[in-house]
Amino acid sequence: MLLHGMKPYFRKILLCSFLCVAANAVLAQPSATVKRYMDEVCRIIEKQYIFIDSIDLPAARRQVMPMLDSAESTKDIYPAIEAMLRNIGAIHMHILPPSVSSQIRFDTTKIIYPSSKLLDDSIGYIKVPYYLSPEKMMMIWADSLLSQIMTLDRHALKGWIIDLRGNWGGAQGPMIAGLIPLIPEGLLWSNYGRHGKPVGSTWSRGGYFFERNEKGGGWSFPTQYQHDLRQKQLPVAVLMDSTTGSSGERAAIALLTNPNARSFGGRSGGLLTGNTNTILSDGAMLIITIAIMKDRNGHAFPDRLIPDFPVQPVAGTDRVLDAARKWLDCH
């Protein structure tokens, strides 16, 4: 009625305005590609995320929809997925672009190996970095760590310092297998999935790192080096801080089952959960939390590991390392 009563000139202008607004509204809607990709991600989360029953995933998805208005390809969706994961409180879950995902699976040129040195002519110092490299390199990496421990063991030592600062995770197998001479035998922790269902456990057994799955089977982590130390039951100082996370925290837990071990530094990063990786349709990797950890007594681990000896860092010094050295001097 309004358009019919207007002069033709104004009617055309108003009609064009309506069409432009309608066109922009259509363009602002996420594309079919975006919707399919978000559907794919949400299906995986619904199927695998341990805390799915206590979150509102559809609401978290709706919250990030404005971020998808201009998305043209799957790579434009990653920030929205990260935001959605934060909205549901999943601090240990991430999406890694295909470029990063492929490096994790195939790149052998960017591996950071453990390093070591003899301190004060009597302390075996080992720096254990994160492990984010191909599976085929795990045993080589673990053997590198083991060989350095065995080399330092040839000296007359009064103790060990294992530096896990900056170790934010990756694969736990090579870390714990490489540190196995300093870890007592027995259960290290158990993993539990949805509704308290046991989904596996981790052990130190016969000088090897061993994982058992929920069906009773499992695998060990064989290495080529001798495991027995010449000097047994020496004190072990474990250094950690807020950049010690995930598998780095698990390495700390394994070492601290040793009654002669104590921790120094700051509270850990708080990523004490079990994750699984799923490769998405575009090659990106979605990391999903599927389990919580409990100690050998069945108690769930706290959000963060608290050091036995808290030490505040000071720029230009290494007070954490100094505190560990002084402690070893007294043992």
Image: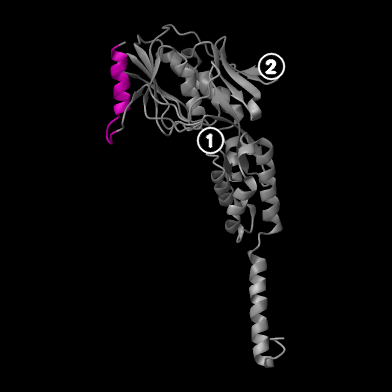
Mark 2 lies on residue:
216
Q: Quadrant of the C terminus?
A: top left
Say whether residue 310 is left or right of residue 167: left
Would you say residue 52 sits in the magenta stretch? Answer: no
Quarter residue 150 falls in: top left
Mark 1 lies on residue:
109
Residue at the image position 63 percent from the left and 45 percent from the top? 57
Say whether residue 259 is left or right of residue 3: left
Task: Say if 229 sits above or below 117 in the image.
Answer: above
Task: From the top left corner, tell me how far across and down residue 223 is, in percent.
Answer: 57, 16
Would you say residue 322 sits in the magenta stretch? Answer: yes
Say whether residue 77 is left or right of residue 1: left
Which mark is in front, 2 or 1?
A: 2
Residue interval drawn in magenta: 314-330
Residue at the image position 70 percent from the left and 91 percent from the top? 5
Which secondary structure is most common in the magenta stretch? Answer: helix
